[in-house]
Image (cartoon, helix red, strand yellow):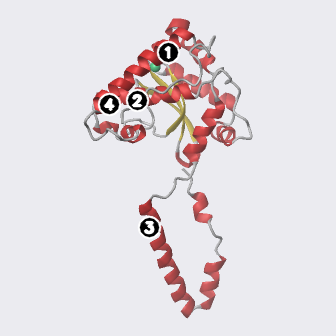
Amino acid sequence: MAFKLPELAYKVDALEPHIDKATMEIHHQKHHAGYTNKLNAAIEGTDLEGMEIEEILAKVSKHSDAVRNNGGGFYNHSLFWSVMSPDGGEEPKATSKLGKAIKASFKSFDNFKEKFAAAAATRFGSGWAWLCVGRGGKLFVTSTPNQDNPLMDVAPKKGTPILGLDVWEHAYYLNYQNKRGDYVSAFFNVIDWGAVGKRYNAATRPKKATKKTAVKKTTAKKAAAKTTVKKAATKKVAAKKTRGRPKGSKAKRRVG
Ligand code: MN
């Protein structure tokens, strides 16, 4: 099935005055639609047809430039629209998982904001600024050129993006001209931290075991049980210790 241009969850003028109607219209209906159509054309009749976009991007170095540029463009803009809202702008709640993670990773929200704005400002030419989930649920800020993103195997710093800002001139030139900094500041007024929080929770949720690993685990458990029985037969003390081990301590550490 071909990729579909996602609809906006708000009207094209809903983010004004921070992001103007004309920019939203052209950005969504022309630019994003263009990436979507070109991505579909690039994968038509190939093995990539029917794959999830994340799966395609994870091995993008093996595919054509058309897949890299348009696949990135499709994914990045889909994320971008979803993390903005006319009701946005409030800081993430300090008690939320995301609020806590921002504090743990950046010390404070203001410190994060400064880092993110700097990443957006210093990205030379066209590209994106990102807030990503790395290993162990730790957050980091990065930026990528063109339509690349941190899901791609070509990215210097890989992670799961949960917030992205488009810093291509087409994203702000009509309203802000050369003043990218003003556009970045305005973006903070429309960030939907609830949506970003949901992405954070999804990215840090322990992955469900696939059938293969589930089978492996069962086999390992059986083997462990056998050993325990053997040991118990020879040494009753050893068996007691095994039972005394706290349950689930291993599972708890399996985050991300
Ligand atoms: Mn764009």
Q: Which residue is mark 3?
A: 215
Mark 3 or mark 1, which is nearer to you? Answer: 3
Residue 229 vs residue 109, the one in the foreground: 229
Q: Do labels 4 and 2 touch, CB within 8 Å? A: no
Task: Tell me, for residue 109, which label it has, or none.
Answer: none
Task: Tell me, for residue 171, which label it has, or none.
Answer: 1
The CA span between labels 4 and 2 is 8 Å
**Where does the image place residue 82, in percent across and percent down from the top left?**
56, 28
Q: Which residue is mark 2?
A: 72
The CA span between labels 2 and 1 is 16 Å
**Where does the image place residue 136, in percent across and percent down from the top left?**
56, 49
Q: Is residue 214 above or below residue 186?
A: below
Q: Is residue 19 left or right of residue 31?
A: right
Say whether mark 2 is within 8 Å of ligand 1: no
Label 2 element class? helix
Q: Which residue is mark 4?
A: 67
